[in-house]
Amino acid sequence: MAVDIRFTVKLSKRKTKILKTLIVEDNPLIRETLKGLFTKHFSSMILEEASDGKKAIEKVGSFKPDLIIMDVRLPDESGLELTKKIKTTNCDIKVLILTGHDYPEYKEAAVRNGADGFLVKGGGSQEILDAVESLFSSAEESTVGKKQ
């Protein structure tokens, strides 16, 4: 079920795009926390979630997200390998790895597999918000519409 959380990115002075975001995380508490964080801080976003790799692939096909927040350790496959699969056929989707494991080999694999960002859980809400905003900043001076 999609939840409209109103996360808007201004692509130019005349164009605004509502971002579609997929949270791929096996822990329901973390999924809920992320949804709450985005609800509180952004003005518009459509949000979907998946608890494993199989559901994530299905959602990528049907939901066509602009952004994926991806855990590394999922019940059925590595989020790093899943990122590679997704980016191979959907290079425009931004993937932000969010993991509880700050291992250099995970960071290296994330870059190698096409992730657009890497964050360690526990780094704080502002770090997540800043990372999402920075993924959609561009030479056109794109901005993310925050709630006032």
Image (spheres, rainbow, N blue to C red):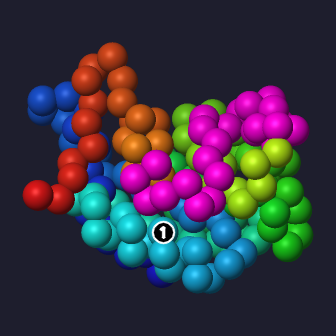
Nearer to me, 77 or 100: 100
Q: Position of residue 32 (x, y in %)?
A: 50, 79
The residue furthest front is: 123
Task: Report the side of 7 relative to 68 (left or right).
Answer: left
**111, above or below 75, in the image:** above
Q: Position of residue 135 (x, y in %)?
A: 46, 36
Query: Which residue corresponds to the image point at 64% horizontal and 42% vertical from the top-left?
Result: 118
How many labels, in total?
A: 1
Nearer to me, 96 or 8: 96
Q: How dense is the environment of label 1, judged by Cα within 10 Å: few (below 14), some, or many (20 and up)?
A: some
Q: Where is residue 36 in the image (x, y as percent from the top left)?
A: 39, 74
Please indicate, yes or no, whether residue 45 appears anywhere in the rendered image: yes
Element at label 1: helix
Task: Report the side of 51 relative to 138 (left or right).
Answer: right
Query: Which residue corresponds to the image point at 74% horizontal and 31% vertical from the top-left?
Result: 111
Quarter of the figure with residue 20: bottom left
Quarter of the figure with residue 142: top left
Give the magenta part as a residue range.
Answer: 104-127
Please indicate, yes or no, whether residue 132 appears anywhere in the rendered image: no
**100, above or below 89, in the image:** below
- Residue at the spot of label 1: 34
Magenta-drawn stretch contains 22: no
Query: Which residue corresponds to the image point at 81% horizontal and 63% vertical from the top-left?
Result: 73
Identify residue type, mark 1: Leu
The C terminus: image quadrant: bottom left
Task: Report the side of 36 relative to 96 (left or right).
Answer: left
Query: Which residue corresponds to the image point at 70% horizontal and 57% vertical from the top-left?
Result: 99
Task: Report the side of 14 relative to 134 (left or right).
Answer: left
